Image (cartoon, rainbow, N blue to C red):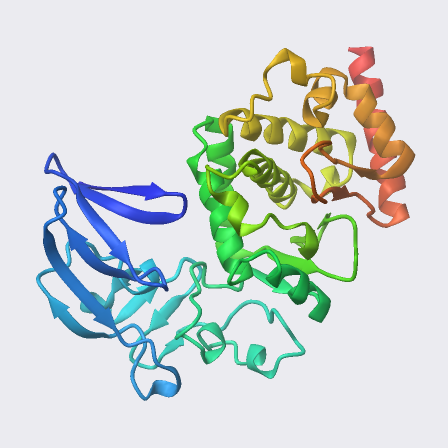
Amino acid sequence: MIRYYYAGAARIAMRTGTAAPQYILSDHLGSTSVTTSSEGVYQSETLYKPCPFRVLREGETRWTSGTLPTKYTYTGQYSNVADFGLMYYNARWYDPLTSRFSQADTLIPNPGDPQSWDRYAYVNNSPMNFCDPSGHYKCKFQNAQAKKDFEATGWESCEEFLDWTFGKLNEITDSDVQAMMKEFYELDAIDPVTFILGGGGEPNGANLFFARKVKLPAHGVVNKSDTSSSSPKYQDALAYVTIVGHEMFHTMELPFLAGTFQGELQAYTMQYKMGVSLGLGWEKPENASWLRPKIYMDNPDQLRTDIINSYRVSAIPGIGYPIASVMAEPPQSIVSMLSFLERRIQRRENIR
């Protein structure tokens, strides 16, 4: 049996059975490049062909030394090239012989970009600079201002930012959060969630109900420099992770729970568990008076009141910069129907 070890989203080591671990070193695309023993002794090395326009075939190896002990190779994806010539990218199969996916993408992430209409293309035909870990585009920019705001945060791409965020969520040991992440990845492979980075001074993010989209303000994304554990704002960065996790939870809820009291209470409960597991100290009594998820868990009527009064809830005070929030604004007809159903359910519970 092979067991892999991770630092965030990065695969850094592996162990076969009871043998000593081996370390995995990656290149800038996340491809497995060098492996060493547990003492750091060089064991193997693989170089790839990440070149566009099929002058060279990206994903094929161009030089090897030693025997690579893992089948996670180009951009860190699982390789079945030796078996039947394809690589598995979670949602689709990639063919390094043609430098294209074997199935069309299920979405066109940026209709204004002609490259996006080639639904078999791999990373807009720019494999020297980008990778596609999910088989889909994980995020996109709403406009030029959003891209400008995002670039000021220090991330090289929105995929890099989301990979760090998902990596932190994957580190959480709480069983409910682990089950949520497993379900998210399974659903994302079938019906992918689009993360939209907005611009133009928008103050809030949103889970766009019924559309499987999460919108985040680009100017509110955590700075890359704050993701180091030595940064004085590291706790703020982890708090932001819980906000994104809150919105991810909404993308998996049943449609009739969208924007409702029960849906929000479940999402805040999950967010609270994320914060506790990430070591933010949210379980401490001194935080109960200001921490929004804890307030709503202890006093659900406050959450109900906030939803009814504004349909705009979620901010965690004191983390120092704009963050994502829920914007529960489904069509009024749906709001009326959901409110009616909720009253009926509450009435039945009271009768019981």
Name the image quarter holding residue 101.
bottom left
Left or right, residue 336 beside residue 295: right
Q: Is residue 96 above or below residue 89?
A: below
In the rendered image, residue 201, in percent from the top left (x then y), is placed at 79, 57
Q: Name the foreground residue: 224 vs 253.
A: 224
Picture quarter with the C terminus: top right
Q: Foreground residue, 73 or 260?
A: 73
Q: Name the residue: 66% across, 59% down.
A: 197
Which residue: 14% across, 69% down?
Answer: 64
| Residue 270 picture location, percent across and down | 60, 30
Is 294 positioned to the left or the right of 23 in the image? right
Compared to residue 331, the image places residue 127 above or below, namely below
Which quarter of the rendering shows the N terminus? Answer: top left
- The answer, for residue 182, to whether it is visible in the render is no
Q: Quadrant of residue 341?
A: top right
Q: Nearer the viewer, residue 277 or 211?
A: 277
Q: Residue at x 74, y 35 (%)?
A: 314
Question: Above or below — where is 56 with respect to 217?
Answer: below
Residue 127 x/y as whole percent? 40, 74
Total count of labels: 0
Along the line of sight, which residue is nearer the eye, 298 or 93? 298
Q: Residue at x 51, y 59 (%)?
A: 159
**Horizontal relation, residue 23 to residue 107: left or right:** left
Location of residue 215 by image quarter = bottom right
- In the picture shown, does residue 161 fall above or below 170? below
Q: Is residue 93 visible?
A: yes
Residue 263 image position (x, y, % from top left): 71, 33
